[in-house]
Image (cartoon, rainbow, N blue to C red):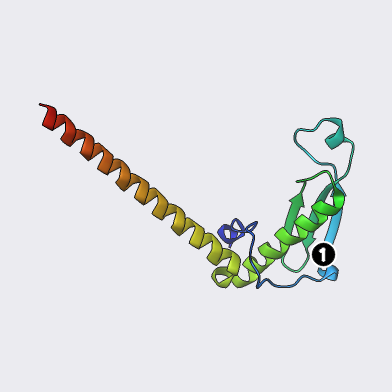
């Protein structure tokens, strides 16, 4: 089920499982990465754990604890939904649709490049 968890973090998923606060364990820790003293001295990184499934989410996207708490809950909700529903999850279906769209775009770009290459070759032959 690990590959499914990588699909989380996508937006516009409406039919997600609900989380209750009793199932969650929340910690505030120091963040990491660039930011110097603002990052190293403040505990605004949120670590959220869903106790029944054991899924842990760490969020340090903003300097605001409240925003990080909200974002962490959204990501955790998507991961928990993905964990329990698997391929039936809206998050998984959305990721598959995006992958398919990306592959189609790549295919069209490749065809277009081949057409241009062929046209160039034809023009060079006509010059000779």
Q: Residue at x 86, y 31 (%)?
A: 37
Question: In front: 29, or 70?
Answer: 70
Quadrant location, the N terminus? bottom right
Horizontal and vertical percent for residue 60? 77, 46
Q: Residue at x 16, y 36 (%)?
A: 122
Which quadrant is home to the C terminus?
Answer: top left
Relative to residue 103, is residue 56 drawn left or right? Answer: right
Task: Kindly give the residue lying farthest to the left in the view shown.
Answer: 128
Image point (31%, 41%), residue name: 113
Pointer 1 residue: 24
- The residue sitting at the top extreme is 128
User: Where is 75 relative to 113, above or below?
Assistant: below
Q: Nearer the viewer, residue 10 or 111?
A: 111
Badge 1 crowding class, 10 Å Cα cut-off, few under 14, some 14 to 19, many 20 or more, is some
Q: Secondary structure at mark 1?
A: strand
At which x and y percent is residue 26? 85, 58
């Amino acid at each position: 089920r690990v590959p499914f968890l990588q699909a989380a973090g996508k937006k516009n998923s409406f039919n997600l499982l609900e989380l209750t606060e009793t199932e969650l364990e929340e910690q505030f820790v120091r963040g990491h990465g660039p930011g110097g003293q603002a990052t190293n001295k403040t505990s605004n990184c949120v670590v959220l754990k869903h106790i029944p499934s054991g899924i842990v989410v760490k969020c340090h996207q903003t300097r605001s604890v409240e925003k990080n708490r909200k974002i962490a809950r959204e990501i955790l909700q998507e991961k928990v939904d993905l964990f329990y529903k698997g391929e039936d999850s809206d998050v998984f279906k959305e990721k598959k649709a995006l992958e398919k769209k990306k592959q189609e775009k790549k295919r069209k770009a490749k065809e277009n490049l081949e057409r241009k290459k062929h046209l160039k070759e034809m023009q060079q032959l006509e010059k000779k």
